[in-house]
Amino acid sequence: MIILNVVKSYGDKYKNLNIDFINAENQMLEDSSKEFDSFLKGVNLTGVNWKKEIKTGRPSDEILNFITEQNIGLVLMGSTGKEGVKLFIMGSVTEKVMRTVPCSFIITKSESLIHLKLEKHLVDIDSIYQEGVQLEKD
């Protein structure tokens, strides 16, 4: 069993701002890795041959690439249960993977999947940037 966590990369999204997000992304990756380890400690994997993998990039793409590269036969994936406008605006990684996955696929709903603290800060940066763009237009 391979337990995969994909940390969303923001570098390309902000490359035209000439801002270096490498340090922020490295910190996000480090924080995510710690949270991932903490999460795994709470999962009973006794008697299971498993390893963990952490990737960075666009989550749906990274998951699908990993499935193909590793010739995965069955995927069990968590869903955060977003609905309505949130799902429409933000999209759903699970939905994107489900539509194109080349193998058997099981979805499990969870109220609390691994939450990336730094992701909120990057979303805040994005909203500040959008406000700046609007101010410049005005």
Image (cartoon, rainbow, N blue to C red):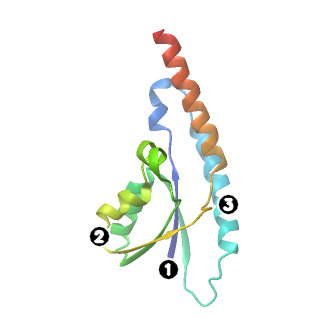
Which residue appears farthest toward the top when viewing the image?
138
Q: How many marks?
A: 3
Check disc 1 and give the amino acid type.
Met
- Measuring from the top left, give residue 4's x and y in whole percent: 51, 66
Image-based side of 35 in relation to 104, left or right: right
Q: Which mark is residue 115?
A: none
In the picture of the structure, the residue carrying the numbered disc 2 is 102
Residue pointed to by mark 3: 35
Q: Nearer the viewer, residue 132 or 25?
A: 132
| Residue with the mark numbered 1 | 1
Q: Marks 3/2: CA distance? A: 29 Å
| Mark 2 residue element | loop
Rendering coords of residue 116 (x, y %): 63, 51
Tell me the CA gap for discs 1 and 2.
17 Å
Q: Residue at x 69, y 74 (%)?
A: 42
Q: Secondary structure at mark 3?
A: helix
- Quadrant of res 100: bottom left
Type of amino acid under label 2: Pro
Q: Is residue 72 above or below residue 60?
A: below
The residue at the point 67 percent across, 53 percent down is 31
| 130 in relation to 82, above or below | above
For mark 1, give the secondary structure: loop
Q: Is 13 positioned to the left or the right of 65 in the image?
A: right
- Quote the CA–CA distance across marks 3 and 1: 19 Å
Q: Earlier in the sequence, mark 3 or mark 1?
A: 1
Which callout, 1 or 2, points at the residue further toward the start of the chain? 1
Residue plotted at (50% across, 54% down): 82
Q: Amino acid at mark 3?
A: Glu
Tell which of 44 and 22 is nearer to you: 44
